[in-house]
Amino acid sequence: MDLIDTLPPVRGALTAQARLSDRSWFGVGGPAEVLFLPADVEDLQSFLANLAPDVPVMVLGRGSNMLIRDGGVKGVVIKLEGPGFEAITVEGNRITAGAGAADLSVAIAARKAGIDGMTFLVGVPGTIGGALRMNAGIGPGKEMRNALVAATAVNRQGEKRRFALDELAYSYRHCDLGPEWIFVEAELAGPFGDKEAIAAAMKDHQDYRRKNQPINKKTGGSTFKNPEGHSAWRLVDEAGGRGYRVGGASMSELHCNFMINDGSATAADLETLGETMRAKVKATSGIELQWEIKRIGEPV
């Protein structure tokens, strides 16, 4: 019996062997055994509460920092999208955003309301759920934890809980909340500021990205985390990584902490490239780079 035939009833959509490559910025990867698009938070809660505990579950955002392996993903891949997860509301200096809302959309909402402290979100090409999970940002003082008040999440038992900022124990590109919790909403806040100054800061972030990052290529953002006291791109560059190629994958000439798919790469090409860079950096500097991109699924 196929997995999809054993799953609880839903109001959203369940699709067997759903293609994931077109949901990833790299444009690679095998299918999801089952893709679930819940109608809303209550639909997600009901599904999880009635799902067999041995069925693997994974959440997919915009796929902007994710490498899906060529063999695809076993179990259920959950995608939070549509009105039930993308709503953004503003009340005073606070913004409540669903986990499926684009980071850029939240930044724009903050600008329109004259709320400062969220301009960095224009430089985070993902969703609020992904930003919550990895404390996304563009540098010290410009991370999710600097704007977050609280986050709401649902666990495998279908329980929903609101977590205050200090309960999430954020650190660099890390959230301490266990993977059994799926973020569904964020509460953000910032001081009121000048709308024109906020707009100018957002434009500066966007201009910087266009000039310094290969945002128009099939990429996945920063490949490696910055080791303490070092820049990952500089370590890769010093190890001869700029432009280095494996099959259809290469380290960007523009920003060599970004991997690029020239259109012919497989996920295996990209992962091999990343591991080769880690080995080269370790050999030249003694520093062991850690992946920032999440690698999921099975090899072929």
Image: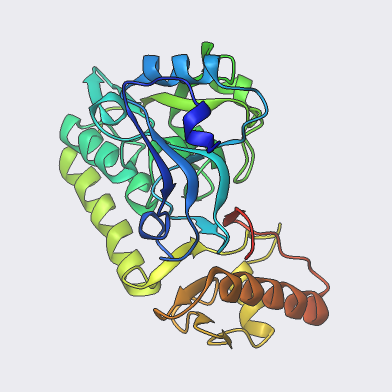
Q: Quadrant of residue 239?
A: bottom right
Q: In the image, what residue occupies the spot 22% across and 41% down?
A: 108
Q: Quadrant of residue 3?
A: top right
Quadrant where the C terminus is found in the figure: bottom right
Q: Nearer the viewer, residue 74 or 119?
A: 74
Q: Is residue 60 left or right of residue 171?
A: left
Q: Quadrant of residue 215?
A: bottom left
Reply above or below: 263 against 157. Answer: below
Residue 178's spot in the image, x, y percent? Answer: 66, 28
Q: Nearer the viewer, residue 37 or 162?
A: 37
Q: Nearer the viewer, residue 163 or 139?
A: 163
> Farthest front residue?
1
Q: Nearer the viewer, residue 87 or 109?
A: 87
Q: In the image, what residue occupies the spot 24% across and 43% down?
A: 198
Q: In the image, what residue occupies the spot 70% across and 78% down?
A: 276
Quadrant where the N terminus is found in the figure: top right
Q: How many marks?
A: 0
Reply above or below: 129 against 172. Answer: above
Reply above or below: 241 against 155. Answer: below
Q: In the image, what residue occupies the spot 28% across and 24% down?
A: 84
Q: How is the image coloured?
A: rainbow
Residue 162's spot in the image, x, y percent? Answer: 50, 13
Residue 13's spot in the image, x, y percent? Answer: 33, 32
Residue 158's spot in the image, x, y percent? Answer: 53, 14
